[in-house]
Image (cartoon, rainbow, N blue to C red):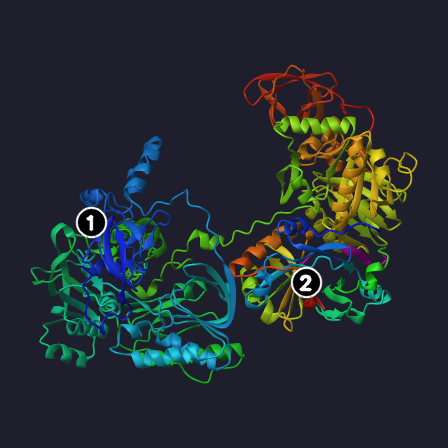
Amino acid sequence: MTYTRHSTLHGALAHRKPAWGTRDGMPVAMRFTSNAAENALHTSIVIADVSFLRKRSVKGPGAAEWLNSSGVQPPLDLFAVAPLHNNTGIVARVGRTEYFVESGPDESAPIMDVELAPSPSAHPMERHDTALLAVGPRVPDLLAQTCGLNIIEEFPDRIVLTRMAAVSAMLLYRPDTATLRVWCDPSFGVYLFEALLQIAQDLGGAAAGVEAIEPLLR
Amino acid sequence: MNKRLAPPYGSWIDRDRAISFRFDGKAHQGFAGDTLSTALWANGVRVLGRSFKYHRPRGIWSLGDSDSNCMVEDERNTNLRGDSLPIADGLDVRAVNTTGAAESDRMRFFEWLAPFMPVGFYYKAFHTPASLFPTYERFIRRAAGLGKVNATNPMIHTPKDYDYCDVLVVGAGPAGLAAAAAAGEAGHTVLVVDRQPYAGGSLWWRHGDQSKLRESLTQRVINTPNMKLRLNTTVASLDTDNWAALVDDTRLTKVRAKSVILATGAYEQPFICRYNDLPGVMLSSAAVKLVHLYGIAPCKAAVVVTANTDGLRAALELHDAGIELRGVVIVRGAHIDPDVVSALQKRKISIHQDKVVYEVLPGPGKKSISGVVVGSAAPPGTPPSLPGTSIVCDGLIMAAGYSPVDELLRQRGGSTRYDKALQQFVPDELPPSVFVAGKANGMYDLSERIRDGETAAEEAVAFLNACAPSTQRPMRPSTPQSAAYPIVHNAEGKAFVDLDEDLQVHDIEQAVHEGFEHAELLKRYSTAGMGPSQGKHGNVAVLRILAQCRGIDIATLAPTTARPYVTPVPMSHLAGRSFTPRRRTAIHAWHEAHGAVFMDAGQWLRPEYYRMGGTSRAACIEAEARNVRTAAGMIDLGTLGKIEVSGPDAVAFLERTYTSRFAKLAVGKVRYAILCDESGVLVDDGIVARLADDWFYLTATTGGAAGVYREMQRNAILWNMNVRVANLTSHVCAISLAGPSADTVLAAVTRGPVNEETYPRVSIRNADVAGAPARVMRVGFVSETGYEIHVPNDAALHVWTALHEAGASHGLKPFGVEAQRLLRLEMGHIIISRDTDALTHPFEVNMDWAIKLDKDEFIGERSLKIIHNKDAERTLVGFTMDASVPDPLPEDCCLVIRNGDITGRVTSIYRSPTLGKPIGLAFVAPDQAQPGARFTIRHHNGAMLEATVTPTPFVHTQGAHP
């Protein structure tokens, strides 16, 4: 495979004229021209596209075994999240018989190279969800305006399948880094990014490049 | 003018900050902290608005945002309430429902027509002739009503949000603050909400100087951890599970509380007598608020009429503030504090014990009052015996009692009952997580209200901790705080029960006599409580009159339903940010950059066509279609539904889902398949490709994808089949490459030859396309030579761009949805939901070949067998029209007419660039379906046009569905 990967937000980011870099075969916005993001990170909120992280999911009664055979130890609890071996990403249990895996920023998790053929009891697939990261002291305000669940208080470190700004989304709030991860159907990616960014800007926030937030992904 | 009482009166205004504003075109000045009503009153303006029906002058009445006497509008907003609208520099408003200014409203003659407008007059007068009703309606709407909505207002986005707490305390008066502090100190998260700009409630204006208590309670709340205090905020509704809607100037907040304490206070109730609505007549709470909060004398010379000690205290405070007190009328049965009476007597204020105010004497133009008539009370329902004693005054201050602010409680499912000891309604049954405290709970003594609040908090904490509370609530007082029947009948009328709707005592009596004896019916017939203030000061009086007319105990009556919202909520607050999700494919930005004109396809945005210089839409579409026929075109099919099915039962699952068979479908082959519902109606279609023995890849229509996937998931469980269904719709992007040069273009970006042998018809192959892993299907929807290239979503833009570049020298161009629709019509292919409707079954659209009635059970099988044995009522046919038929062509849904009867309709029609004449699909009667048969289409402009039944495909005899 020698193709150039593109985030569904590529066009939306290009309008903002970022300095581009490359992560895992995908052009990513490293930083934007103003230093608004740098300031907003500490005072308000920034939102960054992290769709370059590769993703997969597997469903079926044999999903956990399929992951085990691929070298991944999935969490036992429903909606729990666990790190992949050597901190190469995360694995989350998103349903009774369904799991979601995302590679880390530094190196692609080995499971991303496993052949995607279904077994009689497990069906793996490549995922291309738009993946966002929001961080900053106004994250609670962003959530308050877009999501009807009290995620910060009720579901820290848990996967939450819910609605955000009127679209289905998968959320994960990490209290240790005060970061919010958002995954959504890629066809809604531009809409959700712009809706969240509009709110973030109303809160004094900005779009951030990967450079500013990459350490938070580790 | 802006006259004020000297400090300490006027605690809410900042005398150092003068504010200029305009009302009804006139300039005025007030102070920061004033509301529109108070600033106008300070400027000597007494007519703040006009009544809804009779256009009577109205002034300050409740000053509690619970009447509609002062409602104004500006260029953008309407029905703003003057009692709560803060003045600001540049504020320029006018009274609603007036012709000219409120002071000189030209519609004031309507009052003369009052005798001809009894209760329900419009039901009685305007039903015949029916043809005139629109005229009546226009006249009534012009003559009566509220403000006008400015339809040109821009859309306002507001930051609607959510919040959460353990305990929501509604009301930051003494009981509310005490409750909040107690709940917070017990370790719970507490949200306290009050619609006033300051916490403290009546501690600001009742009970003498309570500044220390107010400050200590407020500080106790503020200093409690996990406490939020939201002022200038109204709880507009309280729903199941304690969902509360909080409204402030900027937004609506949806709060979910684990428990709620309602310390909402009570609405003061008026006495009802002749002319009790005129400017100068007001509730005692309004009068003391004017004095204490805004430093304004409500009048120069006042008479106070009261049924409780609060009224007497108000009289004392008015006197001490310098207002001449001409008399205090204490109604019969009032339980009052003798110390306060003594204090009044010491000030040589004349007290009229066991008397009533018969009537208010109007001033000039009824824009003020000139006095009141005081006399002995008559039995309820009978006019007073005159003459009484006239007292000259310009203000009547009324304190007839209280009614709890219980709308939220009743919205939440709680109930109230009439307490005869208190002569008012009190909370009765409460939902488990809801508690009521303070005046809302029928408590009036200040220290008892604070204790009641703290005990309510204990109960809430006990509820949250699932244990029993340890403290008993204080007892309600056993003496009434309200007059049992504060209504003085007067044969001359104009004794107003509901100021919103100009409803008088005799209107309510008349409605009851006409048979509207149930409170809810009476409300709807008389419109009592249906105005902007929702009967906050009139509903109890209506029940008292109803009970008196029917000769029953008021305790047997229940208040009418309390519906959200308690106060008006701007539409922009409800809309919030108006989230409108749109779906875009991975190639959207490319389309945008290349001139695509987008169209809506459900939530998707799809290129309808690509703009070419100054060329018209039709010419662009025609050029795109011609290019596919002569060279090659490509279209973004990212919106197409894409589903994988795997597992040991995959074949059985698909055979039960679709109407076709798949057991013998070879690996690497694809088959067109249709989906029906249980009634045999055609609901979707697509391709089924076999990737392995128990692994299939399916497509569904753009509009049907989500529904098909959902139904498959449901059925997999319902049928207990060992299959997995995965929705790849947005994770895989598809590109359709079509036209005579398609082979060549594909060959340029993939390895190995592209021909009939490597990519046979109706096959699927894994391939490397421009470096990306792809599933390539040889199918022909818009052209005999066509490929669908399915690639990972993150590869879509790369592959699309590579194809575009590789195909440029072969004439490859993108085409949009409109060209696709035209091209597939030339191929004779239908589009589900365009060429079918909610009743179309496969036999009507000539898809008998796709229905395997002899196989095992499948969705729609039983219905299709029945339908199959019946004569068809309509048939979809291809048709052509003469090339000379001018544009515009008939539209979809133009009717097929035979001898004046409808026999069918057009479902698709285009002018074919290939054939140079109109082609289309239409439902016709079965006997009109023979090739060569002629039928008539009624053009939407009325012309009758001839069409000829023509076999499909129109442009070729081969290349039908795989």
The chain ID associated with circle 2 is A
What residue is shown with label 2?
Answer: A211
| Residue B296 seen from this side | yes
Q: Is residue A126 magenta?
A: yes
Tell me the residue that label 1 is attached to.
B103
Residue B962's place in the image compared with B63, above or below, is above
Question: What percent of the width, then of the height, locates residue B244?
Answer: 47, 64
Check residue B481 in the rendering and tell me which mark sits there, or answer none. none
- Could you say where residue B307 lies in the image, as x and y percent from the top left? 21, 70
In depth, the one of B611 and B561 nearer the eye is B611
Q: Is residue B825 magenta?
A: no
Residue at disc 2, secondary structure: helix
Identity of the residue furthest to the bottom in this view? B470
Of residues B468 and A112, which is closer to you in this image?
A112
Residue B283, percent from left and from top: 23, 64
Give the magenta range: A118-131
Tell me: residue B142, above or below residue B421.
above
Q: Position of residue B745 (x, y in %)?
A: 83, 35
- Amino acid at dot 2: Glu
User: Where, quadrant-wise, is the C terminus of chain B in this rendering?
Assistant: top right
Chain for disc number 1? B
